[in-house]
Amino acid sequence: MRTAFAAFALMTLSASASVAATSAPLLDYVGQCVPFAREASGISIYGDAWTWWDQAAGKYDRGHQPRVGSVIVFAKSSKLRLGHVAVISRIVEDRVVMLTHANWSRVNGERGHTEQDVTLFDVSRDNDWSEVKVWYRDSEGLGGSVYPVDGFIYAKGAPAKGLTAKNPDYVAALIDAYVPAAGAPR
């Protein structure tokens, strides 16, 4: 009887912890990009970010055009040894979107925090989203690095609430993309 009660108590505590974890606001998350992208998009893929593209084959539709709620998969590179995944939060124009992701810029001196509606700029020669620049908080503008992208994984359902702000700054996103020195300190 005591063992059955202990098992019931453990199951109850586990269920409570799970509910508490999922009821926290999306932007309060601190951690790696993969669990954040999985929770925010509803795409159930595990493992390092760079493996998501191949893992999605046959499970999710994939493509090379951003859609709100889709996950962009950054390829493994010398700057991103494990790749990176982020969720598209807004489409601004053909070559500029906003994304929400975790563990990119430093926030209050540490990595892991979530950033909402960050500018992502397609800098690929063929306008195919195969190479991008990402807004980086530390430089207050688009970073100087160009990152290779495998593509976008399209979620089957709606993205999590809180993925985008009520009034994102489209003008700032366009300035970030097309006037790179505009945010530089003088």
Image (cartoon, rainbow, N blue to C red):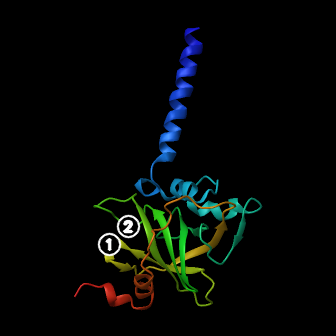
Looking at the rendering, in which quadrant would you find the C terminus? bottom left
CA separation in Å, label 2 and label 1: 6 Å
Q: Say left or right for 123 vs 152.
A: left
Q: How many marks?
A: 2
Considering every residue shown, the one lying at the far front of the view is 166
* Mark 2 residue crowding within 10 angstroms, few (<14) / some (14–19) / many (20+): some
Question: Do callouts 2 and 1 mark residues in contact (Cβ within 8 Å)?
Answer: yes
Q: In the figure, 7 relative to 27: above or below?
A: above
Q: Which residue is mark 2?
A: 105
| SS state under label 1 | helix
Q: Which residue is mark 1?
A: 138
Image quadrant in which you'd find residue 50: bottom right
Residue 128 disc label: none
Considering every residue shown, the one lying at the far left of the view is 186
| SS state under label 2 | loop
Identified at 42% across, 78% down, the residue is 169
